[in-house]
């Protein structure tokens, strides 16, 4: 099992602890991941980290698909791939309607079809087999729709990429998982219970069956984000994770339009998911956080005393032996926590 760091996106200010990343690189961590919401972007810090490291892979977790054209993303990925000597990993996702329509001014329409077309175009650009032509429901190359000049022509990238690039997608909903397994090289669930892989397995296998290539779990990387909060007082350690989970379960999207809420129900916490969402959407955030089950926190995280964390790491490693997990992406750890986890895994 490999280890990675998930840095996420910024708040009102943006700082990256490059020293911690370099220490992780020397410890043997294999990757670091950056995200974006509606402030800092994921690409700029990825380039900045790649420029100041030499071994660790850097990925976007995720670049929002509606924020950039497929060609723009392919150009960015090709350039970073070449400059970093193949250390860049392209992580993509459709985001959600609040950000897509509220921030980017784009319709949130058929996000899975859009994701499929987006990745197909990027693969074509990287392949450089011929000038790119594509006729999809979301994308047409060259564009022939309303207000087109008619002067567009198929183009082939001037830059020669060093082979195809690894593409990951963010996925927790069943259809998203199936699509990831079909067309991507891996996926990163926002969180995961390693003992409940059956939540993913059927949809992953269905995706494999539709893939153009022969695929199984040994050809597909599953990299869940795992919150880290190590300390003697487990209740104190749980608090920041409960705040995060309450936000995703209760505050992302709306009633009936929250993928994370649906996902937590599949994990076996249906009533908690309903109650947390009701409280969160009526502004009762502290009460919503209190309702996040300890069992859920403990099962998705590395939380509490070191002996608890070591026990959970053994469960993650067992899942990795069965190809159910490729890497865990740690979120929220400090130097000594990174070192402790590395000593127990690498």
Image (spheres, grey):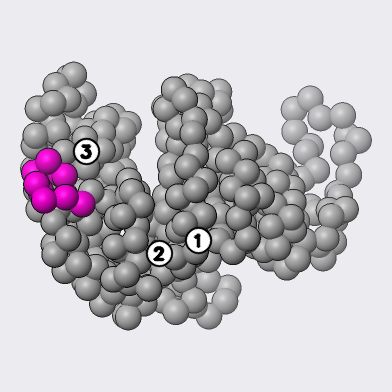
**Disc 3/disc 1 C-alpha distance (Å):** 26 Å
For the N terminus, the image quarter is bottom left
- Tell me if 276 is positioned left or right of 333 in this view: left
One can see residue 7 in this view = yes
Q: Which residues are magenta?
A: 230-238
Residue found at the far top of this picture: 283
User: Is tag 3's residue or tag 1's residue first in the polypeptide sequence?
Assistant: 1
Question: At 87% across and 39% down in the image, what residue appears?
Answer: 152
In the rendering, at what x and y percent does residue 74 appear? 70, 50
In the rendering, at what x and y percent does residue 56 appear? 55, 61
Identify which residue, 277 or 256, lies in the foreground. Answer: 277
Q: Secondary structure at mark 2?
A: strand
Where does label 1 land, which residue?
25
Circle 3 packing at 10 Å, graded few (<14), some (14-19), many (20+), is some
Q: Give the vertical position of 243 relative to 186 (above or below).
A: above
**Disc 2/disc 1 C-alpha distance (Å):** 10 Å
In the rendering, at what x and y percent does residue 283 appear? 18, 19
Q: Give the vertical position of 76 relative to 106 (above or below).
A: below
For the C terminus, the image quarter is bottom left
Question: At 47% across and 42% down in the image, what residue appears?
Answer: 17
Q: Secondary structure at mark 3?
A: helix
Q: Quadrant of residue 163?
A: bottom right
Circle 2 packing at 10 Å, graded few (<14), some (14-19), many (20+), is many
Where does label 2 land, which residue?
3
Q: Secondary structure at mark 1?
A: helix
> Which mark is nearer the camera, 2 or 1?
1
User: Is tag 3's residue or tag 2's residue first in the polypeptide sequence?
Assistant: 2
- Tell me if 55 is positioned left or right of 7 in this view: right
Q: Which mark is residue 240?
A: 3
Q: Quadrant of residue 276?
A: top left
**Disc 3/disc 2 C-alpha distance (Å):** 21 Å
Identify which residue, 320 or 138, lies in the foreground. Answer: 320
């Amino acid at each position: 099992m490999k280890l990675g760091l998930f840095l996420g996106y910024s708040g009102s200010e943006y700082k990256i602890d490059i020293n911690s990343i370099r220490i992780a690189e020397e410890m043997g961590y294999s990757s670091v991941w950056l995200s974006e919401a509606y402030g800092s972007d994921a690409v700029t810090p990825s380039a900045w980290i790649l420029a100041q490291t030499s071994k660790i892979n850097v990925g976007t977790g995720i670049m929002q698909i509606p924020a950039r054209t497929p060609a723009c993303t392919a150009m960015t990925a090709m350039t970073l791939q070449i400059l970093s000597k193949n250390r860049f990993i392209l992580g993509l996702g459709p985001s959600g309607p609040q950000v897509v329509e509220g921030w980017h001014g784009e319709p949130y329409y058929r996000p899975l079809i859009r994701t499929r077309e987006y990745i197909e175009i990027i693969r074509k650009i990287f392949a450089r087999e011929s000038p790119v032509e594509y006729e999809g429901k979301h994308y047409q190359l060259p564009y022939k729709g309303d207000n087109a000049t008619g002067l567009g022509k198929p183009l082939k990238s001037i830059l020669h990429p060093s082979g195809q690039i690894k593409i990951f997608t963010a996925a927790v909903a069943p259809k998203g998982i199936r699509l990831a397994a079909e067309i991507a090289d891996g996926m990163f669930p926002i969180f995961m219970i390693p003992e409940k892989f059956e939540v993913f397995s059927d949809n992953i296998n269905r995706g494999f069956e539709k893939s153009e290539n022969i695929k199984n779990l040994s050809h597909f990387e599953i990299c869940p984000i795992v919150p880290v909060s190590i300390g003697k007082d487990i209740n104190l350690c749980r608090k920041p994770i409960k705040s995060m989970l309450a936000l995703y379960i209760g505050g992302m999207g709306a009633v009936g339009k929250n993928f994370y809420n649906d996902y937590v129900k599949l994990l076996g916490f249906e009533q908690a998911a309903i109650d947390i969402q009701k409280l969160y959407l009526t502004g009762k955030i502290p009460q919503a956080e209190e309702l996040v089950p300890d069992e859920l926190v403990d099962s998705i995280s590395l939380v509490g005393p070191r002996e608890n964390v070591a026990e959970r790491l053994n469960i993650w490693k067992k899942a990795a032996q069965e190809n159910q997990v490729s890497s865990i992406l740690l979120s929220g750890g400090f130097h000594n926590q990174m070192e402790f986890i590395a000593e127990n895994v690498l």
